[in-house]
Image (spheres, coloured by chain):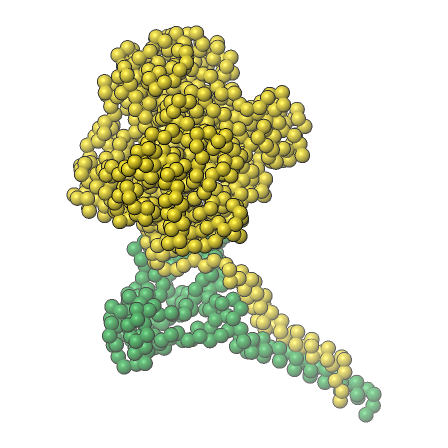
Chain colours: A green, B yellow
Amino acid sequence: MTGENKQQNSGLLGWLLFVVGFAGALFVGWVVFPQLLFSTQYQPINYNHAIHQEEAGMSCEDCHYFRDDGTYAGKPQLATCVECHEEAQGETESEAMLVSEYVEPEKEIPWISYSRQPDNVFFSHGAHVKMAEMECTDCHRDVEKETETPPVKINRLTGYPNEIMKMYVCEDCHAREHVSNACDVCHK
Amino acid sequence: MKLDRRAFVKLIAGGVGGTLLSPLPWKMADDTAIWSQNWFWRPSPERGGATTVNTVCQLCSGGCGVRVRLIKEKRAVNIDGNPTHPVNQGGICPLGAAGLQYLYGPSRIETPLQQTGKRGDLETMKAISWDEALEILAIKLRGMRPKARGLVCVSGKREGTVPELFARFLHAYGSPNYNVMPAAADAESLGLFVSQGNSGALGYDLENAKMVISFGSSYIEGWGSPNRMMMAFGDWRSNPKRDRTKIVQVETRGSLSASKADEWVAVAPGTESALALGLAQVIVSEGRYDRTFVSKYTHGFDEFRRLLRRNYTPDKVAAITGVEKEKIIGLAREFAGTKPAVALSGWGQGRMPGSIYDFLAVQSLNALVGSLHKPGGVTRMPRVPLAPWPKVVLDAKSLAGENEPRLDGSNGPQFPLPAQLFHNLVKNVNEGNLYPAEMLWVYEANPAHDLADVQPFLEALDKIGTLVSFSSFMDDTTQLADLVLPGPTYLERLEDAPIPPGLQYAVFGLSQPILSPRFETRHPGDVLIQLAKSLGGNVGASFPWSDYETALKERVKGLADAGRGQVADEPGLQPWKGGQGRQLAPNYDSFDDLWEKLIEHACWFDTSEAMPSWESAFTTPSRKFEFYSQKMRQVGIRGNDLTYLPHFKPVEPAGDPRDYPLLLMPYETMAITNGPVANPPFMTKTLFDFQLKGNDSFVEVNPKTAADMGLKEGDRVALQTERGTLKVRVHLTGAARPDVVFIPTGLGHTAFDSYIKGKGVNANEILVAQQEPVTGLAIWWGTRVKISKV
Ligand code: SF4
């Protein structure tokens, strides 16, 4: 081989390595990193949204309601479940667990939140749902047909779930809807 | 083929490029920032449903109704004013709003403590159980019983069933030494006693007054019931349905109360009452007084008139006070010509006893214009018809105690009036007079910080056998204690809230435990009952109740039995409208019903006690209002005519003017607490940086005085009085006269926690308390001072 050839070869190899490095980093960044960053957590028992709506004829507000003082109750307390599930209502494993692990010992179900905002954020469901008349699904996933509660991806570094709404999303919408973006609107 | 350096660089470059186009670096940067905000010690609020509970604030004697917001009924997150409570009508002061910082603050005491080493050493304070603590105390008290008079108690609270239980314990045990911390109420009570016949307190019908002259009272900075005053002020100023009430503030300092008044009369230091007498002189000499009242219902008017003519003509008063003669005459005419008009007495927030003569001078002015016991004037505070407890069971030792002289010297040969003279008690202990103080109980008071002239108190502690504190907090006094019996805070316990100072109608507030006690604390009422039972004998028999709640209910039954008043359960109640003497139909039908409603709404009020008529109001020897006090003579006060008449004879401030050329005057502000609880961090945050900067306090100096002394804003100076030296910084302000410098009280704690301790200096350390010769009351409105740059 001539010296020139050698040079050409190593140049090619160099570019090949560049592409390997580039692709490898993309793979790590897009595929491996998210796997590492988020832990997967499962709800204590499966909750079937679809069956509660279709068979029990319940509406969203039966569990996710506004309290009399206008604050939003979020996830229901055990007392709401007990209204119907004093005794097991079906054969599923979750149903058996609900009664034996939570209803009977009167222990609250430790649901994991998909979108709990940080403590330094003052978020009012009332302002968004009642006043701005937004739909739940504008921000949350549609659970109407959901028969299995999906696992929650929790960021190992921050402790927050991956579905959480980031500040720029709030700001975008506020700007579009001509709502103030002053700091103290959300950070009291 | 060889991986050379260039190829390697390309691999890395590719890696970097790829990484930059992936979310990794951006997400990591963002998440790391969030991670750094989530350290494990960051507090996270409880989440869940909220409830609101009504109760009464006990952080001062204001008696405000408050609402506490609780999450999941266990975590208190907010306090605001209760709109159904007639006293504050939904208003709240900064202290009341910061109440949760006391509940959750780090200076709470968690268990009983015993000092096993040297007093003041927190390291050797040992946590003990309640059984041990009560046993230790009971053994000591049993041993001390032959010297029962040596038990001294000082309470920061003046009224209410818990202070009454303390007084009761001492009575049964055989000690005459139940004391309260000094306050303007001392001069008020004595002044009423000598001029109207019965001690007690005043009720000002301020909401119905058309003109108010305040003689040094910080009427919107904490005087009386602070929120009630704020509400009254709002009404005077901005109620379109009534005429604007004229407010005149007579005060040396350009305070907030002065700046919000229609007129600020800047008198020479300590001469407020001279101005009152000057006004009286004009009113009398021009015949503008209420002739019916003066001729039929007063005694000693001629002597008073002669004294006024001799000593308090406008010229003379102008010379004393520095107020122009024309202003004095004009003000007197306006006061006499406006109906109803009322004059306020009690300096500042009312924490200084003041002179009985200052009180008499101001109240004589009210008498002259016929404002006593009249709508829009001043009357006596109505009584709440609580049922009495059974009489204290006495044995030979308690009977002996009743005949012992009081260690504070009151009710005795030196000071014959029935006063509260804690300063004099301290003096007697230090001088070894009368008999030794074996044990001191401190209840909701912090004398080691709050007592003006605190040094003598600290010295007296060395001579006092045992110091027992009933505080909920590690305050300046408690850290010196030998035994600590911590109580729950006002948000964790049941207790009554008596009528606040200056109110003209009856209220009875009930604080209730809105959450279970956070620590191993015990209600002081229960502690006394348990202690009495373990002592047994007549002391045990004097405390027949199983617990404090039973004892309290027994008294509250009186309200139901009287069938009077209503539970305040709707917003907008204004009991001062329509006058006193209006019967209210009770909105409860039995004691149980009343109690239940009290728990829910926290307040009972009543307007059925009418202001007394002039025929029946006075129980003096002459059955009249006495300008010339026969009562003073009767109790054995010796002197010339002047002694029995309102007059101006200021107690000279301590210090030789040649050594201490300026006068130092303390002042109180709503932004700094002055009671047994220290300024909460929330309130400290509201201070301007010319009041507190870092840990530095400021002294207010007139710009001209400062220029003469070569001082600039922010300069560090030493304030030196006969008692000691404090290092502060200078704030230049026109609110200070050239010859006087002002310093706020309430800062400079040596205890509590790192958020409170060491913030500013404690003015009480260098103020010298003087004594009024006739009454023995302590007076500390001014101390001579020297300022030098450091
Ligand atoms: S004025 Fe006194 S009683 Fe009223 S809220 Fe303030 S601290 Fe509490």
Quadrant in which the C terminus of chain B is drawn: top right
Relative image position of residue B639 (x, y in whole percent): 41, 13
Relative image position of residue B55 (x, y in whole percent): 32, 45
Task: Identify which residue is drawn at 32% across, 48% down.
Answer: B534
Front residue of B352 and B704: B352
Q: Is residue B403 left or right of residue B316?
A: left
Front residue of B266 and B522: B522
Query: Which residue is the extreme one toward the bottom?
Result: A1
> Does A95 sit above or below residue B716?
below
Relative image position of residue B780 (x, y in whole percent): 49, 27
Query: Which residue is the extreme one toward the right?
Result: A3
Relative image position of residue B631 (x, y in whole percent): 33, 18
> Does B393 sit above or below residue B771?
below
Task: Identify which residue is drawn at 34% across, 68% down.
Answer: A108
Quadrant in which the N terminus of chain B is drawn: bottom right
Please say whether residue B341 is visible from this viewpoint: no
Please say whether residue B109 is visible from this viewpoint: yes
Task: Identify which residue is drawn at 46% across, 50% down.
Answer: B114
Query: Which residue is the extreme one toward the left?
Result: B589
> Does A79 sit above or below residue B342?
below
Residue B730 location, quadrant: top right
Residue B369 location, quadrant: top left
Front residue of B484 and B541: B541
Task: Identify which residue is drawn at 42% across, 17% down.
Answer: B276
